[in-house]
Image (cartoon, rainbow, N blue to C red):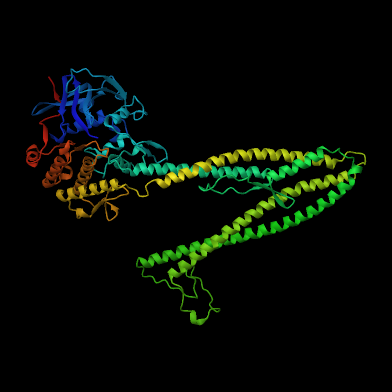
């Protein structure tokens, strides 16, 4: 998707008239030649300013243009005198063209009554043909929404270029668009800080995670980021379902506690193969048996129906039945208290055993770490000999009596590797024991809670029966009345629990239906990090960088040792990112090679988002040798032959520059004095 800069216009009205500069750009290698402090950087920064991207240079919203465009403009009166003029108002205008042949003219105020966030555009070449009739539209920049709303300039510019900016992850976990300020550092290298970082000096204020990687992926059209983003979203959704599932199971357990029940039949995590067609998964301990809610409800309903059909008998008539019930209740209470005592002892013992097992596991983990460290030191060549003796502990080095050990095995102490294997086997065994005892303990604790819950109402029933047996013979039986009230209350509680269980099960079924679909979608995503075409693009970038560095005279080490790290897309050597070991001039050479390499990939492959534009402000940093600079110019001209556009601004002596580009197709625009000169 080619993008071309056609024309740039700078205008500054001063107390002494109108000053400005006009540059008509062409495709291929385009060189701006001007002396130091003459304003050549102002020309290039004016392009960034017109595009509303100055925050790629600094998080602050200051205008990145020289004083000559903002406050005071320096002019030459003669060879010995300089004068400064006050700037009354100024603006920059830029004419650009996209791959569809559409032309857009952009104008933005620098010093004027208008707010600098206001950018005006015309749908045509207003700078090249100012008398044409073009539709004008105004947009806003810098403020929130400029990259997403219809009136936002960056939103419009991305559409004009043909970019569909992807969503990327911030450090706080949120998602935002990959703003153009994160992409253009790979296309524009400014003079002051742009040459300090490879691949680019990215704006950190955006807080985008792996910003450089995301920008390279987008420019080169990698499918890797899109696939990874899909995978992350699916995993987040899968994890969300698991979290909801856990929450619903906990809610189900709380509901079960209202009837002193336990939850069964619902796995701890959703299973793609699971079909939630189970019965209500709550069972209640009643008279030593676990009954489902349905069975318990039916039993209670039958008993309540029976009691409602019976007249409440006087105490005298109910005494034989109450006496029999009292005897049965006392027997049941004895059984329950016996079971309670037994369960309490077992739970206490198993808690103690679990604590002992955990302590043993902690000790083994510590022993394992010490043995692993000892092996690492030995592997690294430590001269301290680690000896194992039956009279000394290998980790705490305390004395151990060996009187029970046969003397013929005293020399067969385990090696470090044997010891590590042995400890790991013990850890594995104890972990499994802990899991098994934990499940058993959990069941016993639930049963103990159920027994405790049954004992309290049973004791109350016994008290009521005893009181009824000694009540006046003609009084209504309090025991019968209490039984009816208790059963009806319990029945209402069960119906409420059933309603809540049904609602929870409906939610679980929805999650169970959604879960396998998401798992299947994740499984269908490509397993590797790259598609075959992505790998070809990476290989081409690596070949381009290496070939250029050979021609540029890279000296720190053999450039053929350089590779492009598939994890970061940065130049690396032997798996390590290249950093401070480079000389200053070789750092510049690597910067040239990398960014021109990105452009070459964009030229060869049509499935990229590289716009085919590259701008270097003062590429001859660190006084690189002339042969290196000559090769840079040659490579740039060669890469830009297919309609790409590479723009250099340099203060290289003009006659030296002519010699350097003698056999290189290029166009040079020369400024003898200040770039901003008087017009008319």
Count of picture labels: 0
Q: Is residue 395 visible?
A: no
When asked about the image quadrant of residue 500, the answer is top right
Of the 4 image quadrants, the one containing the N terminus is top left
Residue situated in front as seen by the camera: 233 or 575? 233
Considering only vertical position in the picture, is 393 above or below 337? below
Of the 4 image quadrants, the one containing the C terminus is top left
The image position of residue 388, as x and y in percent, is 45, 73
Q: Is residue 17 visible?
A: yes
The image position of residue 141, as x and y in percent, is 32, 27
Residue situated in front as seen by the camera: 439 or 356? 439
Q: Residue at x 20, y 44 (%)?
A: 592
Residue situated in front as seen by the camera: 217 or 308? 308
Residue situated in front as seen by the camera: 409 or 506? 506
Q: In the shown orientation, is residue 245 left or right of residue 590?
A: right
Q: In the shown orientation, is residue 462 left or right of residue 414?
A: right
Considering only vertical position in the picture, is 396 above or below 145? below
Q: In the shown orientation, is residue 430 left or right of residue 16?
A: right
Q: Residue at x 74, y 44 (%)?
A: 299
Q: In the shown orientation, is residue 395 left or right of residue 482?
A: left
When asked about the image quadrant of residue 656, the answer is top left
The image position of residue 386, as x and y in percent, is 42, 71
The image position of residue 45, as x and y in percent, is 22, 32
């Amino acid at each position: 998707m080619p993008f071309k800069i056609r024309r740039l216009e700078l205008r500054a009205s001063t107390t002494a008239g109108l000053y400005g500069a006009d540059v008509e750009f062409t495709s291929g290698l385009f060189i701006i030649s001007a002396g130091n402090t003459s304003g050549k950087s102002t020309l290039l920064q004016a392009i960034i300013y017109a595009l509303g991207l100055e925050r790629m240079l600094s998080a602050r919203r200051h205008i990145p243009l020289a004083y000559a465009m903002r406050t005071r403009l320096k002019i030459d009166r003669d060879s010995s005198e300089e004068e400064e003029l006050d700037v009354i108002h100024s603006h920059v205008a830029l004419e650009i063209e996209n791959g569809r042949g559409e032309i857009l003219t952009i104008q933005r105020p620098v010093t004027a009554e208008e707010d600098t966030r206001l950018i005006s555009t015309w749908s045509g070449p207003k700078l090249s043909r100012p008398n044409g009739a073009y539709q004008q539209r105004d947009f806003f920049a810098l403020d929130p929404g400029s990259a997403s709303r219809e009136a936002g300039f960056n939103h419009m510019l991305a559409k004009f270029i043909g970019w569909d900016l992807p969503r990327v992850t911030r450090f706080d976990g949120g998602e935002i668009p990959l703003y153009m300020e994160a992409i253009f550092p790979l296309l524009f290298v400014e003079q002051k800080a742009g040459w300090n970082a490879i691949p680019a000096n990215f704006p950190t204020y955006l807080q985008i995670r792996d910003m450089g990687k995301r920008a390279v992926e987008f420019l080169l059209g990698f499918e890797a980021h899109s696939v990874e983003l899909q995978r992350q979203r699916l995993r987040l959704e899968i994890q969300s379902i698991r979290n909801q599932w856990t929450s619903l199971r906990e809610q189900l357990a709380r509901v079960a506690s209202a009837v002193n029940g336990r939850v069964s039949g619902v796995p701890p995590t959703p299973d793609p193969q699971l079909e939630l067609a189970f019965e209500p998964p709550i069972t209640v301990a009643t008279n030593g048996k676990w009954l489902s809610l349905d069975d318990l409800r039916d039993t209670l309903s039958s008993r309540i129906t029976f009691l409602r059909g019976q007249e409440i008998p006087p105490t005298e008539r109910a005494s034989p039945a109450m006496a029999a019930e009292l005897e049965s209740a006392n027997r049941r209470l004895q059984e329950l208290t016996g079971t309670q005592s037994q369960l309490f002892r077992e739970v206490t013992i198993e808690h103690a055993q679990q604590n002992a097992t955990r302590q043993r596991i902690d000790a083994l983990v510590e022993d394992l770490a010490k043995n692993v460290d000892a092996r690492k030191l030995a592997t690294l060549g430590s001269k301290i000999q680690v000896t194992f003796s039956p009279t000394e502990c290998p980790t705490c080095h305390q004395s151990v009596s060996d009187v029970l050990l046969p003397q013929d095995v005293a020399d067969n102490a385990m090696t470090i590797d044997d010891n590590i294997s042995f400890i790991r086997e013990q850890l594995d065994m104890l972990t499994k024991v802990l899991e098994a005892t934990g499940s058993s303990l959990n069941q016993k604790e639930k049963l103990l809670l159920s027994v405790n819950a049954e004992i309290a109402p049973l004791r109350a029933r016994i008290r009521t029966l005893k009181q009824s047996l000694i009540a006046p013979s003609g009084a209504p039986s309090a025991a019968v009345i209490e039984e009816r009230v208790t059963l009806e209350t319990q029945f209402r509680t069960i119906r409420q629990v059933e309603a809540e269980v049904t609602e929870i099960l409906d939610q679980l079924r929805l999650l169970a239906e959604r879960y396998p679909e998401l798992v299947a979608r994740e499984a269908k995503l490509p397993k590797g990090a790259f598609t075959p075409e992505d790998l070809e693009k990476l290989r081409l970038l690596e070949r381009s960088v290496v070939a250029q560095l050979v021609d540029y005279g890279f000296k720190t080490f053999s450039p053929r040792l350089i590779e492009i790290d598939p994890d970061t897309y940065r130049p690396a050597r032997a798996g390590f990112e290249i950093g401070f070991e480079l000389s200053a001039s070789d750092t510049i050479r690597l910067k040239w090679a990398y960014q021109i390499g990105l452009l070459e990939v964009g030229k060869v492959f049509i499935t990229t988002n590289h716009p085919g534009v590259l701008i270097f402000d003062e590429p001859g940093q660190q006084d690189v040798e002339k042969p290196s600079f000559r090769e840079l110019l040659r490579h740039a001209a060669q890469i830009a032959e297919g309609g790409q556009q590479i723009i250099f601004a340099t203060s290289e002596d003009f006659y030296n520059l002519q010699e350097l580009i003698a056999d290189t197709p290029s166009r040079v625009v020369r400024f003898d004095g200040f770039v901003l000169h008087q017009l008319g």
